[in-house]
Amino acid sequence: MANPFQFLQEVRAEGAKITWPSRRETMITTGLVLLMVLVASLFFVAVDQALLVIVGFVLSLGR
């Protein structure tokens, strides 16, 4: 990188090529991410509770 001015010009040119999402696309994507986080957390809570019941049942057999 011999010329910092040329580097900044190239960075600016590359930045102009970026296709930025619209506000609507950003809101939809954010909503879908939040929905998937909710679904995944409910899934893991259900699996955790099922394993708790199963392990409790297996351990109670030994009493």
Image (spheres, rainbow, N blue to C red):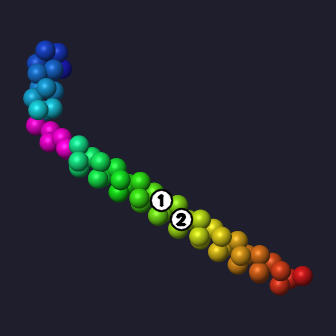
> Which label was assigned to residue 5?
none
Q: CA distance from mark 2 to mark 1?
A: 6 Å
| Residue 26 seen in this snapshot | yes
Amino acid type at image mark 1: Leu
Q: Please, which residue is most extreme toward the bottom here?
A: 61
Amino acid type at image mark 2: Leu
Residue positioned 64% across, 74% down in the render:
50
> Which label was assigned to residue 38?
1
**Horizontally, is 31 left or right of 62 in the view?**
left
Residue positioned 70% across, 71% down in the render:
52
Classify mark 2: helix, strand or loop. helix
Dot 2 and dot 1 residues touching (CB under 8 Å) = yes
Residue positioned 35% across, 57% down in the render:
32
Neighbours of disc 2 within 10 Å: few (<14), some (14-19), many (20+): few
Q: How many marks?
A: 2
Classify mark 1: helix, strand or loop. helix
Taking the magenta stretch, the answer to whether it contains residue 41 is no
Name the residue that disc number 2 marks: 42
Q: Position of residue 21 (x, y in %)?
A: 20, 44
* First to last magenta residue range: 17-22
Q: Position of residue 63 (x, y in %)?
A: 90, 82
